[in-house]
Structures are given as C-alpha cells and as structure tokens.
Amino acid sequence: MKKEEYIVLAGKVEKEKLLKKILGEVFHRILKQISQGENPSLEIPARRKESIVYDEERDIILLKRILMKRDFLNMKNVRKFTQTVAIGATMTELLKRQIHAQLRDIFYNRAYLFETQSESDSIIEDIAAMMGVYRENLGVIASAKGVCVGEVKIRDRGDIIDCSRLGTGGWSITPLVDEVTFIDHKAEFALVIEKDAAFFRLVEDKFWRKHRCILVTGKGQADIATRRFVKRIREELGLPVYLLVDSDPYGFYIASVYKRGSIKMSFDSLRLSTKDAKLLGLLPSDLDKYKVPSYARLKMNEADLKRLMEIKNYPWFKDEKYQKEFEIMLRTKQKAELQALCSKNLTFLSDIYLPRKIKGEDWLS
Amino acid sequence: MKKEEYIVLAGKVEKEKLLKKILGEVFHRILKQISQGENPSLEIPARRKESIVYDEERDIILLKRILMKRDFLNMKNVRKFTQTVAIGATMTELLKRQIHAQLRDIFYNRAYLFETQSESDSIIEDIAAMMGVYRENLGVIASAKGVCVGEVKIRDRGDIIDCSRLGTGGWSITPLVDEVTFIDHKAEFALVIEKDAAFFRLVEDKFWRKHRCILVTGKGQADIATRRFVKRIREELGLPVYLLVDSDPYGFYIASVYKRGSIKMSFDSLRLSTKDAKLLGLLPSDLDKYKVPSYARLKMNEADLKRLMEIKNYPWFKDEKYQKEFEIMLRTKQKAELQALCSKNLTFLSDIYLPRKIKGEDWLS
C-alpha cells in the first residue's frame, strides 16, 4: 500500500502555518485563476462510499485519495464552490482570532448560503480533507459529551486537573482534546463504558482506585473528542484499553467505532481509532456464562436483527470469535443491557463481572 | 393554603432514620396486617393529572395530597402492591449498603416483576411520595448530564473542586448533588445555558472570569441534578440566576422547568425550582432588536405552533410580558436557536448580546 493512495491527515499543525496555507495557497490560487481569466477551481478529495476502504493490514477504515475538481464556472458546481470559499473564509477568521466554533455555529455564520447544517458540515469535512489536516486544526470542533474519572492528571490551558479528585462527578472532556497534556498517572488500564449509569456505579464504588484505572464514558455513541481522548490514553500512556458496551448489535458497533473508526469519519481513522482496544463485554456468551436471568434479557426486534446481519458482514468483524458471538445472538434472538447485571446484584458489575473478565483475559481483540 | 393539603417532601433525611421508617413503619405494618389475617395495604399519594395544581401564590407546580389505598387482596391492585413491596426491599438494600442506583438499575434488579421501566419508575415515585422524601434519599438517582464551569469551589466527598481550574472542559455535575457543599465563590451571578455549544463558546471566551459568574449547562431539557444544583446556587450563594435558551416554545418550556418545576415531578417542585430565575433570552423580541438576519431564523412548523398554543395557556405563562413574546412568535411564525447569533459574528453572544442584556436588565421574570 503506497501512502499517497490514502488521505492521511497531519497531526498537530501550527495555526500560523495553516493560515498561511489557506490564505497563501488556496485563496491565492483562486485569485490568480480569476485574474488570469481562468475558471477558479479547488481540488477536493471525494468522500463517496466507493472511496472508503477497509485496510486489512492495519485493521482500519481509510479514505482513498481520489481528487475531484470543484469549479466556479460550472452550473453543477458553482453553489458548492461558493460555499467552500465562504466556509474557508470563516475558518480563516477562526484561525486568526485563535478561537473555536462548533459545526452549527459555522452553519449559522454562513446561513445565507446553506439550507441545512449537513450541507455545511460536509463542506467543512471537504476543506479538512483538502488541506490534509483535522477539522479541529481549522478551529472547528464538535460537542464533547464524554466524562473521565480516575488515576490520571491532565494539564489543560494552565490548569491541572486531577481526575481522582473530582468527587462523584467527573471531568467533562474538553472538545479541544488535542490541546491537553497528560502529566501523570497511576493507572494500569483504561475502561471505556458506553452507558453513564454503569460509569456512575464504578465511580461510586471507587472501582478506579481499587483497580488502579481510568474510567471514561462516551454516553452512547462516542463523539470525536472522547475517541481521541481514549486513543491518546492508549498511545501516550501505553495503557491497555477495555470496552464495555451493551450486548446488542449497536454495542458491537459502538465498540468498533472506538477500535476501527466510523464510516463517516473514515479519513480520520488513524487519529481516532484505538485498534487494539479489547471488547470486554457485555458479550452474548456472557449472558449464559454469568447466568443472567431470562427476564433481564430483551427480545431482539426486526431492526436489531437487520442491524445484526449488517454488522455480521462488515470485514472488520469477520474474526471467528466475533462471528461466534453474532451466532449466539442470531440463535437466541436475545440482547441485554449492561444494567441487566443488576438483576444478579446491584454491584455485580464492579464486584464480580469486571474483575473476573479482566483477570481471565476474557475479551474479544 | 394549608400545608397538609400538599405533598411537600422533607429536605435532607438521615439514612438511618429512613431505614427505620421503611422497615419499622411500612414493612412492619404490612407484616402485622398479614399476621392478623388482614388485607395488607399501603397508602400512596395519587399522582394523577387532577392532583397536580399550580399554586399561584407561590408560583409553583404542586401535588395535592390525595391518598389511594393499594392493597394485596384485590385483583386490580395485587400486581402494584407486590411491585411496591419489592422495590421497597431494593431501596432498603441501597440504604443499608449506603450506595445509589439508577432508575434503570432498579428496573433490572426487579425485572421479573415489570414489563417496562416506566412501570418501575412510577412505583419508585410512589414510594418517595408515600415516605415524604426525595427519591435520592432512598438511594435512587437519575443520570446527570449537566456541566459547570466558573467562579465557584465545591466539596464533594472530601475532594475540593475548583470550577475555575478545569481547563476548557468542566465539572460533570454529580447525580448526588445534595451531598456536595459550596465552600467558596467569587461570582456575581449564575448563567444557565440550554445548549452546550453556546456553553463552550462562553467557556473558551472565559466569559465567567471577565464577568465573574458561574456557567451551567443542562444540555437541553435539564435533569433533576442540574436543576437542584442551580436551585442550590440561588439559595445558598444568593446569586441571581439567568437562563439562556432557544427562541422557541421548547426553550420557554425548558426555562419554565428551571423556574417552576415540571409537571411530571410536581411533588418535587419546591426543591428543584429556582422561581425567581430570569429568562434572559433568546427572546422572540430579541430577533428584531438584535437584527438577527432572516436567513438565520427558522420557520415554525405545525408541531411548534401546537406546542406554542399549549404553553401559551399554561397559568404560569399568563404574565403579560410572556404573552407578548408568544404573540410575536404567533405573528412571525419564526423561531431561532441561540447559535443564530453567530450569523452576526462568532462571538456576538459573549461580546455583545449577554453583557447588554444583563446590564439593561432586559429579561422576563
């Protein structure tokens, strides 16, 4: 695989360099084209389904480098060309003022050019892919809903946040997660929990102190900041990462987004994916193994089964151990939430299930 | 108004007293009834629509004390009676072990008795109303999604959290909000923001430092912990509370839940409602006043207009100033999100709008 075949975004980029690149290269080129009587144009990487590939070797979802011309003197493109230039100007302002804006802020900032936010979101991703940098580098961030608690100290704009001293609340992960520094930790692993109810259970039981770990919840499908935060824990602190999700097709998908990236953000996979994170549970095979009573299991509906058949065919789930779990779901047509373990005992999750799973290395890689 | 006509829940109650009350009074009475060959029964406050009243004098939504008998030897009641006793036993365990569980945990803990969580939630509220205490006192909590940043220091289980030293993230408000103590503050007011995008804007602009305040976001419709947190800021720190929501019927309702309580939790209003909180904006009249361009305004749909007609008739919105704002919405059929202010300028909210609104005391009481 040649590197240039794929869009691989640069890591941290200095704001000044970026500003120079946007103003100097992109806008200057357009101005030059106009002054020479040419049709001004941009070259944007195509983010179609066909350009999204699963790189088996690296076990990651990537975006192929296929460039498309977006020009002004073209009825089909003029609207998008204009939108791209306008959003580029907003990004220039963000970079100059050294502030950040959310996707929806940008939509409103240029609302006269857009009908829906998904249009402006898409243009923002186009520009990030075109510039070969992350959206955040261009001053555009998404909401972060993750929370962190545990044996780690973080520096964020001069503040030192000790995540072991935040009471029964936690640190609300910043959307600017690449600007924080890990300054110290006493953890042996990180545990990422889909549901905040289970997260709170572990916080109140001080699981993180007893088992020396960092707890993170993404509160459902993880946002970008939370995924990047987990990836940085893995890479910079060298800690193993365990994932804890519901036993259903959505749980498997949520776990796989942490591990391999999402289809939508395929060009950003390398930075966001913790590919060797272990899926600890709740696994379909755990339901019998831990004798979860039948009344605490739920019947899968049509939508669940349809989703199951979809994910069963994803190439990154072809591993035999995953397929075995899918077969159990298909056979029993049962799913279960993390909280189903409360049917055993209100603290079964922290007292029995997690210690046994981790000690027994009972997970999916 | 006589006090005993309404369910008014006790404040902080010692766990041991509660345990004694549940075990000694409730369960013991049932056992006695059984041993005497009587039909065991409980008296539960009715939480029907008819018992929910708006107390004009106190400007708050309350629950009338109308007791209903729930007995065992009664085909209509036996199921609910059994459920109530079982959930009572789970609460006893929570109190004995001094731990907390979420609504869904409790549902699963007794899943063999329930078909849906709304059934078990309802029983939990019944018991809280019957015991005359808050759900949290019985060890049952709901997820908290609020975040706080600003000039306040909090003690939570021995940890001291300085909300002005949390970088660009924030303190994820604990579900056990009654267990924290305010130990110090340098704030002149609290600003409660519906949307976390606007919240982040103010965090990054260090609005809270410049204007000496506490920022809280409930991330949409506020959860109980966030509402209680805001109420405690008002009561214990004596700070004025300003609310910032979208300019639409839902925004008005979200603001009114902070101010007057929700219909669902009517028996809990006194503890959760910050009745003199000021609705700062975004008001329908602000759209013209601050020249929000038409392309940044949204057209109200049928559902919006229906909701508008509903809230327009709520007795707690009958104030002339509110009605005037509703009239503007009805006439223009326009709504707008907080972020619509980004159409003016990305930092218009923090630089212009908020300072001008607060200084000009331009709000609804």
Image (cartoon, coloured by chain):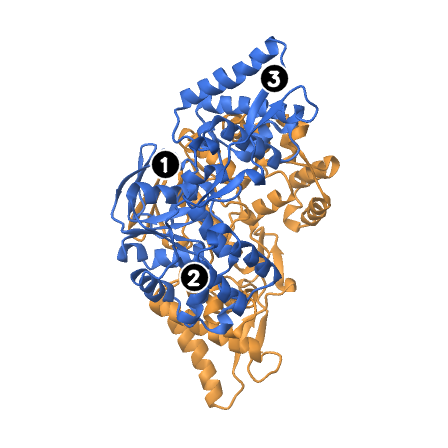
Chain colours: A orange, B blue
Residue B342 x/y as whole percent = 43, 67
Mark 1 or 2, closer to the camera: 2
Have a look at marks 1 and 3 and say if they share a chain.
Answer: no
Question: Would you place residue B351 above or below residue A271 in this image?
Answer: below
Q: Which amino acid is tagged 2?
A: Leu
Q: Which amino acid is tagged 1?
A: Gly
In this orientation, which residue lies closer to the viewer: B266 or A119? B266
Q: Which mark is residue B40?
A: 3
Q: Which mark is residue A167?
A: 1
The Cα atoms of the two marked residues, 1 and 3, are separated by: 42 Å
Q: Residue at left 54%, top 34%?
A: B103
Mark 2 sits on what residue?
A: B282
Name which of mark 3 and mark 2 comes first in the sequence. 3
Q: Say which element carries label 1.
A: loop
Question: Would you place residue B363 above or below residue A338 in this image?
Answer: below
Q: Is residue B365 left or right of residue A4?
A: left
Q: Is residue A97 left or right of residue B109?
A: left
CB atoms at circles 3 and 2 under 8 Å apart?
A: no
Residue A183 x/y as whole percent = 33, 45
Have a look at marks 1 and 2 and say if they share a chain.
Answer: no
Chain bearing tag 1 is: A
Question: Would you place residue B3 above or below residue A304 in this image?
Answer: above
Q: Say which element carries label 3.
A: loop
Residue B299 x/y as whole percent = 56, 67
